[in-house]
Image (cartoon, rainbow, N blue to C red):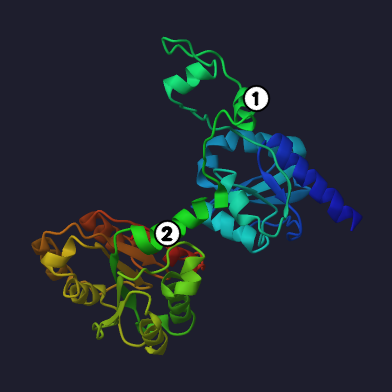
Amino acid sequence: MGIMSSLRRRAAAVAAAACAGVLALTGCTAFNNSDDGTADGNGTSATTQTFQPSGGKPTATLSIASGSENKEVAVAIQKAADQSNVAVTMHYMGSLEIMNALKAGGQDHDAVWPASSMWISMGDTKHIVKDAASTSTTPIVFGIAKSKAVKLGWADDTGAAKPVSTADILAAVSDGKLTFSMTSATVIDSALNVYQTALRKPSWTIWVVDYSGSMSGEGKNGVVKGLNAALDPDQAKKSYIEPASGDVNILIPFETEAHRPVKATGTSTSDLLHEADATDASGGTDIYEGLLSALDELPSESEASQYTTAIVLMTDGRSNSDHQDEFESAYKSRGRDLPIFSIMFGDADPSQLKSLATLSNAKVFDGRSGDLAAVFRQAKGFN
């Protein structure tokens, strides 16, 4: 117990002092002195970066859930690792992912370093943040009417402003001479929910999902889990991507051939999700058959302006390319701005998927990390 406490105090010191702004958590997992198993010898992948101290074997490893913008301060983090002899592993995540990690108790992280402290306010519902320090501040412009500024003595009759401190503003509010409103982490939570369910343009998303034989078992289970994370109202609400009443979601399972499309309107996605779970994985892989079928499920030209439309393709294999030219010709003939987002895992051919992304001005997501639910949420977030 004493050794662990000592390590945590040391890690907190590295986080708060040397890294200047990481928020250290309590009640997280023990430190790990082993390599994190990422892509190269430096412990670096697209989402993970490990900083090893130059002095030799580290005495501990600090795991940080971090916003990707902190890649810009890699030199400072390396310096902190060298000075403390503590390795630092940065897990680059989206702000919502960091918030949800906090809500879940910190998960496997020892500290968090988000883009803004508001994600701490929204996510730290279990009060696990122990030490906090700031890396930067955001300027605030406080604008009031010229007549009010003159009345308060903050400006002369010409409108030229005098120096005004925060204490001056607080005093004016306390004396009832000034009132104002501002956002809080809580006008944000409500706003995100209202936007997702009522204000945003309805989405029309066609999920083209690989059910070839190689998907049997773990692959299919990952697909079902991912679809539930994106389309089950209760699960999706946690990531602010829940379906709204005007949304349309269509599932097209495919292998050598495309299966019958299953359509869900609004929040009634249970039949679609049931079909995703009940469909067997067998046969070969032809993504272009699935995509050709998806083109037939687009909203009509008269409806198109009412929706934000996208196709989300998921595959773990190398596709038969016999129908590639046919699909590309059919896609171009539609003349629509229709992104095709791809989720790649297993032995999927990156060149095929990148070609689709280039064709449709979209993006390829790498689902080979194993957390397919998180990848599905990211893909759904674009639509």
Q: Which residue is mark 2?
A: 194
Task: Residue at 11% x, 65% y: name it.
Answer: 329
Q: Quadrant of the C terminus?
A: bottom left
Q: Which mark is residue 354?
A: none
Q: Amino acid at mark 2?
A: Val
Q: Quadrant of the N terminus?
A: bottom right
> In the shown orientation, is residue 292 left or right of residue 311?
left
Task: Residue at 53% x, 16% y: name it.
Answer: 154
> Residue 358 falls in which quadrant of the image?
bottom left
Task: Residue at 71% x, 55% y: name it.
Answer: 127
Task: Residue at 52% x, 44% y: name it.
Answer: 183
Residue that lies at the very extreme toward the right in this rendered image: 2
Q: Earlier in the sequence, mark 1 or mark 2?
A: 1
**Nearer the observer, 354 or 361:** 361
Helix, strand or loop status at disc 1: helix
Observer-side mark, 1 or 2, equals: 1
Asked if residue 54 shows in the view, the reply is: no
Is disc 1 surrounded by few (<14), some (14 to 19) or many (20+) residues within 10 Å?
few
Asked if residue 304 shows in the view, the reply is: yes
Q: Which residue is mark 1?
A: 167
Q: Amino acid at mark 1?
A: Ala
Give the image location of residue 174, x and y in percent.
64, 32
Give the image location of residue 318, x and y in percent.
32, 71
> In the shown orientation, is residue 346 left or right of residue 52?
left
> Residue 196 falls in which quadrant of the image?
bottom left
Q: Is residue 164 above or below residue 33?
A: above
Give the image location of residue 19, x and y in percent.
67, 37
